[in-house]
Image (cartoon, grey):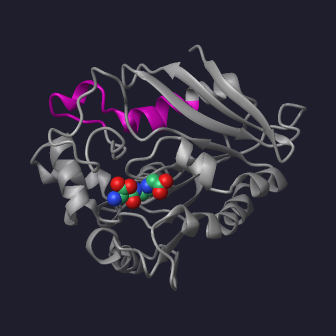
Amino acid sequence: MSLETVSTSRSHGGVQGVYRHRSRATGTDMTFSLYMPPRAGEGARPPVVWYLSGLTCTHANVTEKGEFRRACSELGLAFVAPDTSPRGADVPGDPGGAYDFGLGAGFYVDATREPFSRNYRMWSYVVEELPELIGAHFPVDRARQSIMGHSMGGHGALTVALRNPDRYRAASAFAPIVAPSQVPWGMKALGGYLGDDRQAWRKHDAVALIEDGARFDSLLVDVGDADPFLTEQLRPEMLQQACARAGIPLTLHLRPGYDHSYYFISTFMQDHLRWHADRLG
Ligand SMILES: N[C@@H](CCC(=O)N[C@@H](CS)C(=O)NCC(=O)O)C(=O)O
C-alpha cells in the first residue's frame, strides 16, 4: 500500500497534505487530502473525521473552501477528504456528459452494472480501502472515527454511518440527499450503477435503511432554505419523518437565506466539527 505525497503545507500548526495512491477498489489512481492537527504522532493519535463531497467535487473543493482547519487544529481532529469517483482516460463517464453521473458522481456505491462495475467501487474505497491505507501511513486513532458530507456526500455519510454504527461515533451532513430512491439525482445514479432492482437500492438510501431497521445514536443535519435543490433533490423532511418514527435523535437546522454552496458549508463547518469532537472524546 504505497502512497505518493503530492503536497504538504503547514496550516494552523498542523499539516495539510494531498496524497495519491493506486486503488485496488477502483483500479485507478486516487487522490485524497488529509489534515493532521498539531502534535499528531508525538504520542498523540487524533480521531479521524471523514468528509464525503458532493457532485462535481474532488478532494480539493472542501480542502480549499471548507474552512475546517482552524477548528480541526483546536479540537485535535484529523480530517480526510476523498475524491468522489474514479478518474482516468479509461474510466467511463455519463454517456451524455452530464455532471450528475459518472466522473465526480460516484454516489458511494459499488456499481454492479457494466461498464461502471469495473471502476465505480466507491463504497469499498471509502469504507474499507482508504481507512486501511490511512491507518497504515498516519498516526490516527482508528477506534475514534466519525463521518460527515455534503449533498451526494451527505447521502454517503448517512448511509455509511447507518450501515456501520459501531465504527462511526458521529454522523452529520450539509444539505444531504436523504432518499435517493425517490429523487431524480438518486434514481439516475442508483439505476445506472445498480440496475433496475429497487431492492438493491435500499442499502444506499438513508430513509430506506432506517425503514428497514438501521439505527444511529444521533444525527446532525444543516440545510439552507435558499438551496435550489431543497424541494426536488434533498427533501430533508423525509429524513425527519423516518427518524421520528424510528426514535433516532436528529437535529435538523433549516438555515434562513443559505444556499447549497461552500459559503453555506463553511459557515456551519465549525459547529459540526465541535459536535463531532464532543462525540469522539
Ligand atoms: N450545477 C452545479 C451542480 C453541482 C453542485 O452544486 N455541486 C455541489 C455539490 S452537490 C458542489 O459542491 N459543487 C462544487 C463547489 O461548489 O465547489 C455544478 O455543475 O456545479
| Place of residue 6 in the rendered image (x, y in percent of width and height, measured from the top left) | 63, 24
Q: Does residue 251 appear left or right of residue 106 in this picture?
A: right
The one nearer the camera, 43 or 23, is 23
Q: How many marks?
A: 0
Quadrant of res 171: bottom right
| Quarter of the figure with the C terminus | bottom right
Determine the residue positioned at 45% across, 77% down: 247
Quadrant of res 134: top right
Quadrant of res 231: bottom left
The one nearer the camera, 238 or 14, is 14
Say whether residue 34 is magenta: no
| Residue 173 in sight in this render | yes
| Quarter of the figure with the N terminus | top right
Please provide the residue range marked out in magenta: 110-131
The one nearer the camera, 225 or 220, is 225
Say whether residue 126 is magenta: yes
The one nearer the camera, 211 or 198, is 198
Relative to 171, does residue 60 appear above or below in the rendering?
Answer: above
| Place of residue 92 in the rendered image (x, y in percent of width and height, measured from the top left) | 23, 29
| Residue 153 in sight in this render | no
Residue furthest toward the bottom?
Answer: 256
Quadrant of the picture in which ligand 1 is shown: bottom left
| Place of residue 88 in the rendered image (x, y in percent of width and height, measured from the top left) | 35, 24
Determine the residue positioned at 41% across, 80% down: 244
Relative to 108, does residue 224 appear above or below in the rendering?
Answer: below
